[in-house]
Amino acid sequence: MRSHGAARAQTTLAGLAVALVLVTAVTVGAVAAADRVLADAAGESLEQHRAESAADALLTESPITWSDNGSDAVDLTLANETNATVLAAAVPPLRGAAFRVRIDGRTVAERGDPSSGYTVSRGAVGVNRRTVRRSINLSAEPNTTLTGRTNRTRLDVNPAPNTTVRTIWVDDRVALHQPAGIEGQHVVGVSSRPDHEVRVETTGDEPSGSVDVSATAFDATVVRIEVTVDA
C-alpha cells in the first residue's frame, strides 16, 4: 500500500516538472519580447537584431571563442566540435529561432530552416592550437628552439645525479635560476612572439640528463563568420 508521504512526494515532483517547463517557456518568451522591443527601438527587424546580437556574442564569450591576454579569437578546433544545441544554450539571441552559423563559408551549426532569415557577417581572428615539444640532451647541445607562437612554456628538468642545472634562459630572459639546482616541472610565461630559444646553463665536467620543453602553440589567421537568424 502506497503511503501518503510517497504520494505527496510524487505530486511534488510532478508539480516541479511542470513549473520548470513553465519557467523555461516564460524565459524564452521574455527574451523574445525584449528582443522585439530593442529591435523596434533601433529600427531593425527582429531577425536583424538577433543576428547582430548573436554575431557579437559568438565573437566574445561563447563556446567557440578563446581568450588570452584580453584578446578574443575564434578557436577553430572548438568551432569544429560545436553544434546548434550548444550554441543556442549559450547565446540567448539564438534561442527559439532557426539559425545557421558559418565560418569561411563552412556551416558549423544549423537548426531549422533559416534560409529566409537575416544574415550578418563579421571579420575575426581565428586560431588553430597545437602541442609542440622539444628535448634538450644535456650531454650534447644545451639549447633548442620551440617553434610556434605561445605565451607559456612547460619545462620538465631531469638532470643526472652528477649534473646541476642552475639557469634556464628563454630567449634573452632568465626564466628560472637556482644555484642549488633546478629540477622537476615548471611553467614559465613568455612573450607571445613566434619561436623561442631555450638555453640551459649547467655545472659539472660532463653534464647529462635532459630538459623537455613543451607548449600549446597557436597559429592565427583571419576568418569570416556569418550568422543567419530567422525568428
Image: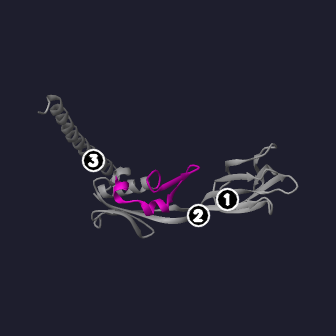
Between the residue at mark 1 and the residue at mark 3, the CA separation in whole angstroms equals 44 Å
Please report whichever mark, 2 or 3, sits nearer to the chain's N-terminal start: 3
Please say whether residue 78 is one of the residues in the magenta stretch.
yes
**Residue type at tag 1:** Arg
Within-10-Å neighbours for mark 1: few <14, some 14–19, many 20+: few
Residue 45 visible in the snapshot: no
Q: Quadrant of the N terminus?
A: top left
Task: Give coordinates of residue 226: x percent, y percent.
Answer: 41, 64
Residue 194 point in image, percent of width and height: 67, 61
Q: Marks 2 and 3: which is nearer the front?
A: 2
Q: Residues within 10 Å of mark 3 (few under 14, many from 20)?
A: some
Measuring 49% from the left and 62% from the top, which residue is drawn there?
77
Residue 206 numbered mark, or none? none
Report the magenta residues as a range.
59-88
Residue lying at the far right in this picture: please name it. Answer: 205
Indicate the colouring scheme.
one colour
Q: Which residue is mark 2?
A: 219
Q: Which residue is mark 3?
A: 28
- Quadrant location of the C terminus in the rendered image: bottom left
Q: Is residue 212 magenta?
A: no
Please name the amino acid that badge 3 sits on.
Val
- 206 to 178, vertically: above or below: below
Residue nearest the viewer, comparing 117 with 23: 23
Q: Position of residue 10 (x, y in %)?
A: 18, 36
Residue topped by disc 1: 193
Depth order, front residue of 150/216: 216
Q: Quadrant of residue 81?
A: bottom left
Amino acid type for the residue under numbered disc 2: Asp
- Considering the numbered disc 1 on the image, is that residue within a helix, a strand or a loop? loop
